[in-house]
Amino acid sequence: MEIKVDELAGVKYTAKDFASDVDVKWCPGCGDYSILAQVQRSSPDFGERKENIVWVSGIGCSSRFPYYMNTYGFHGIHGRAGAIATGVKLANPKLQVWVATGDGDMLSIGGNHFIHLCRKNIDVKVIMFNNRIYGLTKGQYSPTSEKGKVTKSSPFGTVDFPFNAVKLATGAGATFVARSFDRDPKHLQDMINRAAKHHGAAFIEVYQNCPIFNDGAFSLLTEKETKPDNVIVLEHGKPLVFGANKEKGIKLDGLNPVVIDLSDGKNSVNDCWIHDEFDDNPTRVFLLARFSDIPNFPVPIGVFRQFSKPTYDKDYVQQISDIQAKKGAGTYEKLMYTTNIWEVR
Amino acid sequence: MEKEKTQEKEIQSLTEVTVRFAGDSGDGMQLSGSQFTETTAIVGNDLSTLPDFPAEIRAPAGSLAGVSGFQLHFSSSDIQTPGDSPDVLVAMNPAALKVNLKDLKPNATIIANSNAFDAKNLKLALYDTNPLEDGSLAGYNVIPVPLTQLTMTALQDLDLSVKEKDKCKNFFALGIMYWIYNRPIDVTSKWIESKFARKPLILEANKRALQAGYNYGETTEIFTTRYEIKPARLPKGIYRNVSGNEAVALGFVAASLKSGLNLFLGSYPITPASEILQELSKYKDFGVITFQAEDEIAGIASAIGASFAGSLAVTTTSGPGLSLKTEAIGLAVMTELPLVIVDVQRGGPSTGLPTKTEQADLLQALYGRHGEAPIIVLSAQSPADCYFMSVEACRLAIKYMTPVLLLTDGYLAFGSEPLRIPEFKDLPEIPVNFRKDAEGFHPYLRDENLARPWAIPGTPGLEHRIGGLEKKDIYGNISYDPENHQVMVNKRKEKIEKAQQDVPDIIVEGDQQGELLVLGWGSTYGAIKEAINHVKAQGYQVSQAHIKYIHPFPKNLGDVLRKFKKILLPELNMGQMATVIRSTFLIDVIQFNKVQGQPLKVSEVENKIKEVLGGQNGN
């Protein structure tokens, strides 16, 4: 049965059209409010009718997200949003499918589904709210918590190393990988819009503040005074520069990124690494992704990489239509009688 | 010339024969068996097969652990099982002989590849002396055939390696069997031609080995008798042979055609269920999507997503996979989406006996979920019945917007029998009514069957959110209200109970009341039926009833049970259905349990019936 999906013909939405009638129940001051607001503001620009948009989630604070969107929504079980979303997309590839998830939901219990969604390049867009803590279960460390973190389940500090989600997504084969902040509405909207336009597995890591269990986790990156020296904004074709007056840059010395001073007369902006988000070779993306793990390096936000690769859903549909063109559509007679049969009279 | 020779040999008419092909797991025994089956089906015999193979793909050659077998029971009348004891064993090596000898009928024929009975293989099979020569097989009709040598000779001028030629010996053996049982070789010849179309030398070698085996039977003095088994008088119609797994796959595609929905399978390979995934992956021309997921959980989770989006969604697995899918089944219960889960039961617990059969997932199927999570549970009673029950599972899932779990098992999955192909119009209708009307829509409204509306993404005005949290009655928003939870738990339960209106009454075969009813469920049907036929012939009065709809039960089941003084319940577990029957009806049953990874034998049931009746046959 062909499931009909109408084109967006002359329909103009506003952010309000994407707000459901359900009261939003995150804690006061939670970064999730901003993410919801930016998604609702961006949604009218997706070019999709709202009945063709599906939000899928797993379990956790972030995963309440679909309830607040006036689209189709599916609140799944812990970790399985990627797999559920895959089923939705394959069942009807014309739908635009999004996943709202958290660091625990997607990188811990859902890790397997996440890497395979990326590997298969299924046209599903994942927004991962990374607050580096388990919020809904009230404060245990997560797979993105920094080593040594003291939490309710690690009173003497964790001994495990965190995942770098950008590296993981890139390594697994996601074809759009970006990072943003809850506290940077414009930038976040831009990332959401670009993910919406991408065809293939898209991943946005959003650093998100949990005011209750991990308050200030990203304040160094989001506060006015410290942000310029600690954040670098990636823009395609632009040099990697940062600092309040753009007085610092990143140079590539072989495979080693080096912070250079652009005001000392020895280096100029021409020495800086020029960001190429369409780079075929993921090596530079891994170098960029590593910045957030190196002390005194700025944390990159923006699109790390995007490239075009056949999507699983398109190739699958193509395979079906090729075979149907060759063999004709299936019929009951073909199904049951195309084998050794005999008649009993 | 040939004719004359044939006429020199006696042709003896038989009503039924059970043969078993046995050899190393690399010897192609499953292939020989399935080819003999195809030919036998086309000749028009009724048949039932049982492959029996080890979990190891290639255990050390010649070892007892590596023996793979394929049993085929064929007859000129209606039969129900692959047979308890073979009349004929084809043993490709000493290990195959040793493993299978205990199962043979007294005086059974053993066709043994004498070339394989060398010192090395005898040692591997733990034989001190060669059983073909030491007189230990005196009670049997032993026919040693130098299969390896004969195959080599037949293929000597072909430019193939010794190993490649050696691999053709199963076709030589098959050729002999075709001659003995008077069946044509052309079905297998054609199969070889299509299978090896791209390898002309291998094609030629296999065909030649097959023909040489047939000629060997014809010309050699060893074989003095040919047998004839006349076509069975089965109900009129067009037939094909199906294994249970194949039948489940065909049923799903048929249900897709009947409902007009695209079929979506989310699955992860697992023995003995993988063939359903493999089979369905062929049907791209039917628009079937087979998503081979990263794990069992993704298999069912993707199916739930596909169901939400309007597909006929199914997932297939075996016991360990069912355990992994359990949480997600609860999600499908809560979101009230149609979903079919097939559990091809195998020996458990844990990895257990992956290639062997068992019925020990029953209680898990019924109750193995957290919370109050009732679903419809069905079972199939024979390979061909898998077809009908797979269609039925889809129909009920859609009608009641619920997960339906279909229990089959390894015996049904790998076993085969003729399926009388029903006409499309004779399959049950599977109406689908996607909600279109936005007026008055709420996600948890209910129709007369208590099913909620299926409102799929892409439908304007019906945007809604569902999930695993408890729902507000009718409206579907999250609700933590205590009374509402009770209401919803009740409604989910009532809905499944309501499905009883679709469950046909259970049929009692034989007297409708009396001393003894043998009750069964699932794949034990055939063995019970044949056992009852045997004891009836000896004058015993016994009736049979077989459960296919496990939850909800047929309406009349309690009444039926109360009409018998004794109820015997054989099952391949430690008494799971017995527990359910007792707790549901407060009626006791006599258990007969076997958990050996093997199907019930007719003789076992027969003996148990006699024991229960104390040798009283009513005469």
Image (spheres, rainbow, N blue to C red):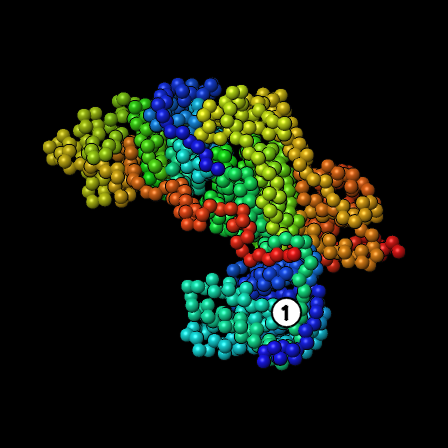
Residue under the point 75% across and 40% down:
B557
Q: Quadrant of residue A177?
A: top left
Give the amino acid at mark 1.
Tyr
Q: Is residue A339 left or right of residue A300?
A: right
Give the camera-side residue of B335 and B594: B335
The residue that label 1 is drawn on is B181
Give the camera-side residue of B431 and B86: B431
Q: Position of residue B342 (x, y in %)?
A: 58, 44
For residue A75, above or below residue B184:
above
Q: Position of residue B607 (x, y in %)?
A: 77, 57
Q: Position of residue B614 (x, y in %)?
A: 84, 54
For residue B480, above or below residue B329:
above
Question: Number of numbered discs present?
Answer: 1
Residue under the point 48% across and 25% down:
B462
Q: Quadrant of residue B137?
A: bottom right
For residue B438, above or below residue A289:
above
Q: Quadrant of residue A255?
A: top left
